[in-house]
Image (cartoon, rainbow, N blue to C red):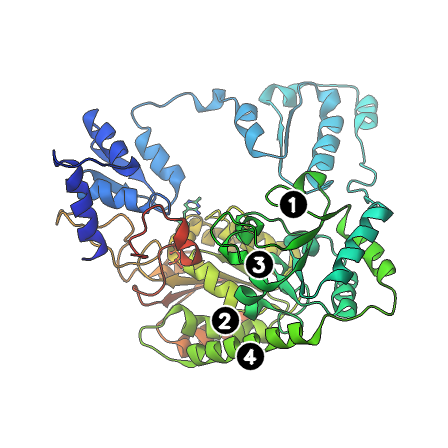
Amino acid sequence: MGTVERQVATASMTNDAQSQVTDGFHLVIDALKLNGIDTIFGLPGIPITDFTRMAQAAGMRVISFRHEQNAGNAAAIAQQGDYEEMDQLAIAKPLCKAAFRVLQAEDIGVGIARAIRAAVSGRPGGVYLDLPAKLFAQTMDASAASKSLIKVVDPAPRQIPAQDAVQRALELLKSAKRPLIVLGKGAAYAQVDTEIKSLIEKTGIPYLPMSMAKGLLPDTHEQSAAAARSYVLPEADVVMLIGARLNWLLSHGKGKTWGGKDHKDWGGQKFIQIDISAQEMDSNVRIDAPVVGDIGSCVSALLAGIGSNWVKPPADWLRAIAERKDKNVAKMADTLAKNPAPMNFHSALNVVRDIIKANPDAILVNEGANALDFTRSIVDMHKPRKRLDVGTWGIMGIGMGFAVAAAVVSRQPVIAIEGDSAFGFSGMEVETLCRYNLPVCVVVFNNNGVYRGTDVNPTGGPDVAPTVFVKGARYDKLIEAFGGVGVHATTPAELRKAMEEAIRSRKPTLINAVIDEAAGTESGRITSLNPKSGEKK
Ligand code: TPW
């Protein structure tokens, strides 16, 4: 039975008097219908993809948008409030690292200094500064005003780790038979690339880069264990985390990924964690050797403690990793070399991989689901801080904003690899790319929908399935409206030619790369987080 048929069956089961069980999906649908609500404005993505399918199957109208903001506006037409009166500080507070409000003109200097310090010290984060309209009309004596401004001294002060903490970490590392280092984006932010490289190379320990730490050492480095990730995580006995958190991206440091028996079982690894925030320690599993301080100071202290006669990890560990790597790399090379029609993620990304290799200073922006996960694993980065993606929270819509800023600040070419749904969240900003004539090449991996484009409306009604977009859409035409270059690419050769030309010309370019609508899975590599994924059954 196909996904949709099965869900229709499940839905109708709830209406069956014999049936004993229902689930949260159907309770929500039933409660809405009971109250006469027959239309949902939304945006499907896991964990609510199946909910939208079931609601449609149950006869509700499900109208999908390209950004939740627009769905919210659609749903709000009957209940508009006074937007200008909104208490933005209260709304921003739980979402930001800090939120402040300035009420007097004489406090503007303090407010801005505080906001800067809060944003860049310790673990960096976004800060909201509320400047009410009334503030701007206030006047004050010009010389007192200039004295009230503060130039922040040492906004991100160094935090030196305690020597005994460093010693404890080194002892544990020395005792390891199968050590592993995980580099997180904190390691990349720290901008101490030489020290980190030297720590990795002097210890000889294999490492895994998290997505935004890719390129901190070139992904082609022989100590990179990225191509053997699923082998090294469960097998390692001591893991040193450098600016990486044991959050969901690392399966919370436990469970099957780490060799545990079930999803909560500890795999037995000992952890050394280097982080600027003490609070991060023990957040999911025991941290045996916490080293709290800024990454630069911590890595320097470790390097000093390592000295010149550090014993490299056992050869059998390194050999076992190398064997897995070779096997996986060969397998991937076979997959990448295939040339299916229509293109799939692999054949398209094989091109992107070559383009990035030939242009290692270009900045790669990346969002989507399959478009994100496959790019992360297939496209090697060769230099630090050249990869910007949706990060820990997987927020769609960062694409064009990141691309604009990356081009403006770095003046390097920017390549944005975008799922078609992901692109829709910020797509209008292609006008901004054209307005400022930015050297950005947007590649939309167009597979006709959120994740895939193959769903059908099981009721046979006039609306398409919630995850499906206009088939065969021509995103390339969008940028042409503003004078940019649009290209429709249906083969890897066309994609390569268009990307090379975009890099050469530095003109704002949008390539509509047509991908098989059945390629990929629901939500890329995190399908398992879907409460009731049709794909996995
Ligand atoms: C602000 C939920 C995760 S990934 C995704 C959505 C909507 C888009 C996947 O389709 P796309 O990629 O971009 O076409 P691909 O390569 O698989 O075809 N709203 C926000 N953030 C998230 N993460 C979602 C919804 C989601």
Q: Is residue 485 left or right of residue 75?
A: right
Labels 2 and 3: the sequence-earlier one:
3
Q: Quadrant of residue 303?
A: bottom right
Secondary structure found at label 3: helix
Task: Evaluate whether residue 436 shows in this view.
Answer: no
- Distance from the alpha carbon under mark 4 to that under mark 1: 33 Å
Instruction: State whether residue 201 is above or below residue 18.
Output: below
Labels 3 and 4: the sequence-earlier one:
3
CB contact under 8 Å: marks 3 and 1: no
Q: Residue at x 73, y 41 (%)?
A: 122
Labels 2 and 4: the sequence-earlier one:
4
CB contact under 8 Å: marks 1 and 2: no
- Distance from the alpha carbon under mark 2 to that under mark 3: 16 Å
Secondary structure found at label 2: helix
What is the three-letter code of the residue carrying label 4? Asp
CB contact under 8 Å: marks 2 and 3: no
Answer few, some or many: residues within 10 Å of disc 2's Cα (few below 14, many 20 plus, some between 14 and 19). many
Q: Residue at x 87, y 69 (%)?
A: 308
- The residue that label 1 is drawn on is 286
- The residue that label 4 is drawn on is 326
Q: Is residue 443 left or right of residue 383?
A: left
Q: Which mark is residue 352?
A: 2
Q: Position of residue 447 (x, y in %)?
A: 33, 62
